[in-house]
Image (cartoon, grey):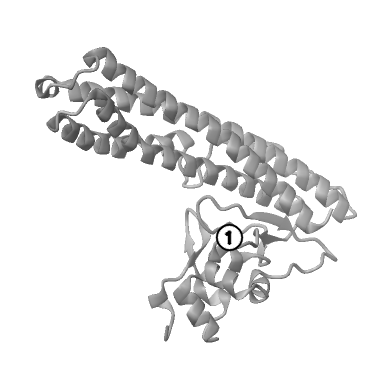
Amino acid sequence: MTPEQFANLQRDFLIRTEKQSAILLDAEFARLKREITDFLIQTTGNRTVPVNLYVAGYLERILLLLENKLDVIGLSAARIVSRAQTNVINFASGELKKYLKLKIESSIFSPDREAIRGLIGRAFEGKSLQTVFKRMTKPVADRARVELIEGFALGESNAAIAKRISDATGMARYRAMTISRTEQNEAYRAASREFMQEADIQQYVWMSVLDPRTCLTCWSLHGRKFKSSKKVFSHPNCKCVMLPLVKNQPDIITGAEHFGRLEIGYQKQILGAKRFEIFQQRKFGLNDFVGKSKSKEFGEKYFVKNLSDLPES
């Protein structure tokens, strides 16, 4: 198996697992929308909600229902992501073991699977998954309160008010999806790093999908080598994977080298108009647009620099 084939195998599994989790999370939020709408219909029929019902505590009843349901979704989401983490961790360690047996002569390594399993349910922010998902409740409830008050004040129908609540929970759904993707990917990377260290693999290579939809940061990271103990972070929802670096393995062509061979139109699409203009003037190379910082939570974090941070830009 070539390094590129191995990277694609890992990435494809991550994407499939992510899609399965997304389907389950979507079902949770669809259920929330139905329950809120049913509550409104049961209490008001098809009538417009009178303002005096709000004064009597109707608003608070809806918000309490919403908060309770969001707490339930948070628990369900934590379970969904934990199951996905289990899958990606088991897959990563299993496939790494197969790959490394093909690439190194010795098979004496035996990574501590229990230590790797300890990654399940642990959020990259240092909090439990349940705690991270619970953070969704208050901002959504605050937004819902504003929407409900406005809807009541305008004398809107229950259908219109239900839509307002649905829109308010949209940011919770988006946040849940982002947490899910990021935590699955982080569990995969953490397990891979631990596996490689146990297998005495000293370095790994960052592998990105080099196409026009890949962000500038990941283009820059592609082909870079890092110590197997080093935690590297690019951005939420990142689809990049890690390739163990073994003896006699051909060098991976870097993202910067690949980028230089692209058609001008693709280069502009990836860089954006202003950065592309600077790039064409030969003032900066691809990697000059990407900075890094150190974070206790994220490790070595890479990001696209602001144009104002580019000297003489």
Q: Residue at x 51, y 74 (%)?
A: 289
Please identify the quarter of the rendering in which residue 118 is found. Answer: top right
Horizontal side, residue 249 vs residue 62: left or right: right
Please identify the quarter of the rendering in which residue 87 is found. Answer: top right
Q: Residue at x 51, y 56 (%)?
A: 235
Compared to residue 131, the image places residue 34 above or below, namely above
On the image, the x and y values in percent for residue 157 come to 22, 25
On the image, the x and y values in percent for residue 122 come to 53, 39
Q: In which quadrant will I find the C terminus?
A: bottom left
Horizontal side, residue 291 vs residue 255: left or right: left
Question: Which residue lies under the disc numbered 1?
Answer: 214
Horizontal side, residue 156 vs residue 4: left or right: left
Compared to residue 293, the image places residue 52 above or below, namely above
Q: Residue at x 30, y 17 (%)?
A: 39
Residue 81 visible in the displayed image:
no
Disc 1 residue type (three-letter): Thr
Compared to residue 304, the image places residue 37 above or below, namely above
Disc 1: CA contacts within 10 A as few (<14), some (14-19) or many (>=20): some
On the image, the x and y values in percent for residue 257 come to 67, 74
Compared to residue 41, the image places residue 304 above or below, namely below
Which SS class for mark 1? loop
